[in-house]
Image (cartoon, coloured by chain):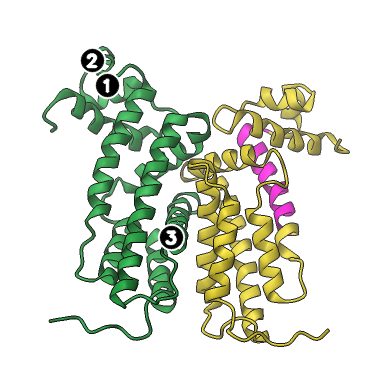
Chain colours: A green, B yellow
Amino acid sequence: MADDPATEILDATYRALCEHGYANLTLQDIAVEADTSKASIHYHYDSKNQLIAAFLDELFERFIDRVDSPVGDTPQEQLDALLQVLLSTDADPSLREFRTAMLELKAQAPYDPTLQERLTEFDEVLSEQLRAILAAGVDAGGFDDTIEPTHDAEYLTTTITGAHTRDIAINQSSEQLYVTMTRHIERHLLADEQPEVAQ
Amino acid sequence: MADDPATEILDATYRALCEHGYANLTLQDIAVEADTSKASIHYHYDSKNQLIAAFLDELFERFIDRVDSPVGDTPQEQLDALLQVLLSTDADPSLREFRTAMLELKAQAPYDPTLQERLTEFDEVLSEQLRAILAAGVDAGGFDDTIEPTHDAEYLTTTITGAHTRDIAINQSSEQLYVTMTRHIERHLLADEQPEVAQ
């Protein structure tokens, strides 16, 4: 249970999104999940749109926490850890429902500049983190020196986005893509000879 | 103008989807676009879902026509032509609206097995065509012989899907990704030395 009502409403928004999807989501659904009233929600958030924006801001903070500090001693390990986080499907049983709601939000973005702005931030922080890992890997020698960090990061970001879309649209597990991406990275992005790691 | 009423209704469905999106689409919207009555639509299609399924079947036929006979004398040219078709944004002024509606449909797929089945067919025909082009390219020598056609085709399909999602979600033109994909293909998929083409 969250500490304060505004945060509890955001947690309830996550559960309500998973249960109802975005298109059919009402403040009443969120009030039921939060065990509170619509009036109480309106006290904290003016509208469904404002609540969703606050929810995405909160989600963005958590996303930054997950993406910004990749686990691993080398850039290769960090890239692998990041892909595992982004493509795994078994960490959270509500993940599929949540990804479905996120895909709905993406389809609404052209009609909602605030929403599009938030989604763009998610994309940029991921792309930038991938770029930083690739650049560090080239510098350390573990990644092939023909890598163009900005372009390759853009490419990886697009592929990860596509894996999430296919997971929902055609029920193609993104974990399968993790395997394919790992082979791809080994073949195309890693240097043929790995530098020795200090023990 | 289409020849028969059922086809005219499908054409009107395209225009109505572009204008209203999928979530808010009603048979009345389609009737207005087709300049006919809801009763007339019901004569041909039982429900909105059945009409959308028929619409996707029609779209699938056109998609197969576009994807199945890629232009070009060599597998490289065919791959490039296919990517141009799939990632260009200026061929049709209603394309963005249509891609937005398609993304909505993708987000609805988990709730609608018929829809998911149709979307899976699109994915499979694209993936198979890419696989065939890559395999032909390896055989002809223009593509690197370390290519794994099935896996690389899966990877390209996922990236193309991601380009379409990002086009809508964050207004990132898929044409930019065409440039990135072309560099990627040149670096990673083409053989270092190209076979001579008979003049």
**Disc 3 secondary structure class:** helix
Which badge, 1 or 2, comes first in the chain's sequence? 1
Label 2 in the same subunit as label 3: yes
Residue A133, quarter of picture: bottom left
Magenta highlight on residue A65: no
Residue bearing mark 2: A40
Position of residue B59 measured from the top left corner of the image (x, y, whole percent) = 70, 48
Residues in magenta, as a range: B46-64
Residue lying farthest right?
B3
Q: Position of residue B44 (x, y in %)?
A: 75, 34
- Residue A123 as seen in the image, left or right of residue B176: left
Q: Quadrant of the N terminus of chain A?
A: top left
Which chain is mark 3 on?
Answer: A
Task: State the residue position of label 3.
Answer: A150
Do callouts 2 and 3 mark residues in contact (Cβ within 8 Å)?
no
- Say which residue appears at 55% left-offset and 41% top-offset: B105
Question: Which badge, 2 or 3, comes first in the chain's sequence?
Answer: 2
Residue drawn at (28%, 74%), measured in percent from left and top?
A: A140
Q: Position of residue B88 (x, y in %)?
A: 66, 52
Magenta stretch contains residue B58: yes
Q: Residues within 10 Å of mark 3 (few under 14, many from 20)?
A: some
Q: Amino acid at mark 2?
A: Ser
- Mark 3 vs mark 1: which is more N-terminal? 1
Q: How many marks?
A: 3
SS state under label 2: helix
Q: Which of B94 and B186 lies nearest the eye of the viewer?
A: B186
